[in-house]
Image: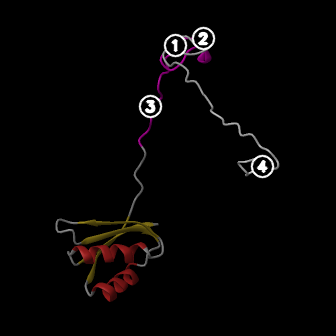
Amino acid sequence: MKQKIVIKVNDCDKCTRKAMNIACKANGVNSVAIEGSDRDQLVVIGEGVDSANLTCSLRKKLCYAALWSVEEVKAKPKPEEKPKLEVPKPNKPPSSTCSCGCPQLPMCPQYPPYLMLYETKVYDYTPSPSYCPIM
């Protein structure tokens, strides 16, 4: 069963970041968020989260944490989808046209092909080079 736990913590930025890090490390937590008009409410959603243990561990690290509410999160009912009427598409072969709609010849006229040129250097290798300029 998924549950939503709301814990009030100090409203300083450092405390809320610390509280989020501690809550993220708890077992069974799916999501953690900061809410409230003063950004002082830590909202933890998860399965099998021990709310009392989480609040105690926050008190140890932050000196102030109060458990406000624990409630079950109910799954939202999925709206029934109406069957869509499919409109028949004109038959045209997918390989005969490109994305722009022009007929596929050997190549698309909208996008000219780019040439792939390779430059190589040929080195003459002699097995016993002579370093003497006089010879």
Residue mark closest to the camera, 2 vs 4: 4
Q: Is residue 105 left or right of residue 80?
A: right
Distance from label 1 to label 4 (Cα)?
Answer: 54 Å
From the viewer's perspective, is the residue at label 3 or at label 2 nearer?
Answer: 2
Amino acid type at mark 1:
Pro
User: Is 104 located above or below residue 44 in the figure?
Assistant: above
Crowd rating for badge 3 (residues with CA inside 10 Å; few <14, some 14–19, many 20+): few
Q: Which residues are magenta?
A: 79-101
Q: Which residue is mark 4?
A: 129
- Give the residue number, with chain letter if any, for mark 3: 82
| Number of the label disc, if any, that sits on residue 109 | 1
Q: Please name the amino acid that badge 2 sits on.
A: Leu
Disc 1 and disc 2 in contact, CB within 8 angstroms:
yes
Percent of width and height locating residue 55: 34, 82
91 falls in the magenta region:
yes
SS under mark 2: loop
**Looking at the image, which residue is at 43% across and 79% down?**
50
